[in-house]
Image: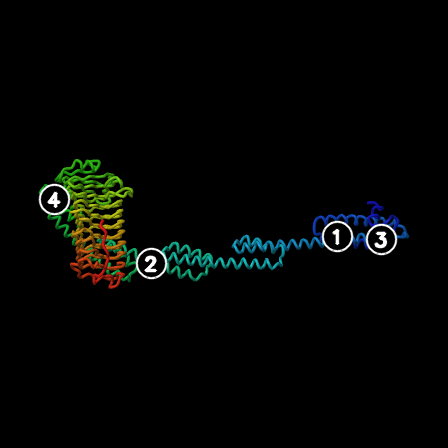
Amino acid sequence: MTYSEAVEVLGFREGDVISPHLPAFRKAEGKLVELIENAGNEGLRSAYLQELAELNGALRVVEVEQSRQPVRRRTGSLVMLVLSLLVLGGVIYSGWRANQWAMEGRQVRLEQRVQMLAATGQIAVEKRRWPEAEAVYSEILALMPESPRGGDGVKAIEAGKEEERRQQLGFLSGTARAAIDARSWGSAEETLKEILKLDPENTEVAEFRKRIENGRFNDKVMTIREAAEEAIRDERWGDLVGRADELAKLAPGHVDLPRLKKLSEDGIRLMEERRIQARQIYQKALAMDEGKYSEEVLDLLRDALRLSREKEYEALYEKMSSYTRTLRVPEDYKTIAAAIADARGQDKVRVGEGIFEESLSVPAGVDLEGAGPGKTIIQSVAGEASAILIEAEAKGIRLASLSVRFEGISVDEERFPVIAVDGGEVVLEDVWVENGSGHGIAVINGGKAAMQSVRVIKSGWDGLAVYGEGSKVTIIESRFDQNLHHGVDAWNGGSVTVRKSRFSNNGLAGVVLMSVGVLSRVETSVSEGNRELGILVAQQTSAELVGNEVIGNLLGGIVVKDAKTRVEIANNTVTRNKKAGIMVDRNASMVRFENNRVSGNDVGHDGVQEDLKAELGESKER
């Protein structure tokens, strides 16, 4: 920049005296520096920088070239100075004012931004989106460190998190209680871990853990007691000894321990007595062995084997069975059907271990025996035919030591029984019948069956159905469990004689007797835990119920219905049944009612209808 240009920038003409005015220009230069530092935007700052650069440059040139200035000031130079300063002052004021407006606009925008963020933060807090809320209020405090909105927001987040923590603790406490009530101990313990993560000093956890510990202990005791009771029912005395020992170790002072020990001692003594009795029977059978077939001797050996299954008894039984022709499967015949087809009356068909996918029609006089239930299994497809059929002309048949079951399920309106005795006659010994779609065993059209140590479970209809004029079944030491309808059902002319048997956990009644004018007898048996009645007698049936235990059935113990139904009820124990213990229709005929022990049932008088005044309505014919 030349001296002439510098003088012009300062508002003078060449020849004017400038040096007296330089301090004023330096002050103006300082004001421009302040405006630059406080510029509200980049445009203003650039304009101020340009003004400062021109002023600074002009002042430097003038200060260097002072020697060229005249000694005397021209007329009017003072006026020019004043005008220049006025112009520069106007520029500086305009810049300052513009900067103020920019700063005011920025403050308004800042307030608007903070207000918007505060609203967003409030929504995030209400919806418990804590990371989002924390980010929002952090930005507010960064923009306006003293803003009450920022501080209030941080407090709201802290309060919300604490409230959420308390709610989670309440939910987890409820979940732990529910798991404990449901005896789901593992689930309860996992929930307690979650509680301690949220609240390490939680005071409820110790109480919960004590309840879990007590519950697990009680479950162990209950499991041992249930196993012991099952061993008692099945007369597995060796198992009962083990259960009693377990209970003694776990709970030495348990109130039931003396009883279990006494029963185990009695049971072991009974086992020994049976072994002695079996030995005597075996010795008798051995003396009668004359080298020829004898059903009498074989019956003795079967009795000995039921009492004590010893190898020498089995060996003699096999020997004497071989006196007649013995057909062996799979050694001599690949299938049971092939052996039966070749069998003559009194022939023995002996079947080894394995699953035999067959549907059999057994001819008269055949003795079919397996290696034991669960070892020899005859299995056929549900919906196609019965696994075993015994027709009217088939008499003198014996089935023993095997399992018979269906594979698959049939939901047809008419369904095959697993074993059908259609007018024929059969003896069933130590046979398990399982998974029938219809009845487990059906004895119909005048059929006859004698059952000992038979077990029928999980049938789609009745475990045993006996119907049709002249159909009769004798049942000894057998079990009918978990069948969808009744355990045993005799109707429309069918009858049963039952001793020392058990009917439990069936979907309807344990025993149903509904044959007009036909006598059935149930004695020394147990009907327990069925979903309807323990024993139902109806439709003019005659029944003798003597010495039975009827326990824990859901709709009643013993119920007798309909006019002309005749019944004797004596020496029975009827307890813990829902609704009535014993209820008899006032139109029925009570031939004898004595020495029955009725207690703990739901209806008054311990559930016994002593005055026999109940009006039960008529049963429908089937």
Q: Where is 56 relative to 350, above or below?
A: below
Mark in the foreground, 2 or 3: 3
Dots 2, 3 in contact, CB < 8 A = no
Q: Is residue 242 visible?
A: no
Mark in the foreground, 2 or 1: 1
Mark in the foreground, 3 or 1: 1
Answer few, some or many: residues within 10 Å of disc 3's Cα (few below 14, many 20 plus, some between 14 and 19). Answer: many
Residue pointed to by mark 3 = 81
Q: Nearer the viewer, residue 485 or 7?
A: 485
Is tag 4's residue or tag 2's residue first in the polypeptide sequence?
2
SS class, disc 4: helix
Answer few, some or many: residues within 10 Å of disc 1's Cα (few below 14, many 20 plus, some between 14 and 19). Answer: many
SS class, disc 1: helix
Residue pointed to by mark 4 = 295
Is tag 2's residue or tag 1's residue first in the polypeptide sequence?
1
SS class, disc 2: helix
Is tag 3's residue or tag 4's residue first in the polypeptide sequence?
3
Residue pointed to by mark 1 = 95
Residue at 31% over, 56% down: 220
Q: CA distance from mark 1 to mark 4?
A: 133 Å
Residue at 30% over, 57% down: 222
Is tag 3's residue or tag 1's residue first in the polypeptide sequence?
3
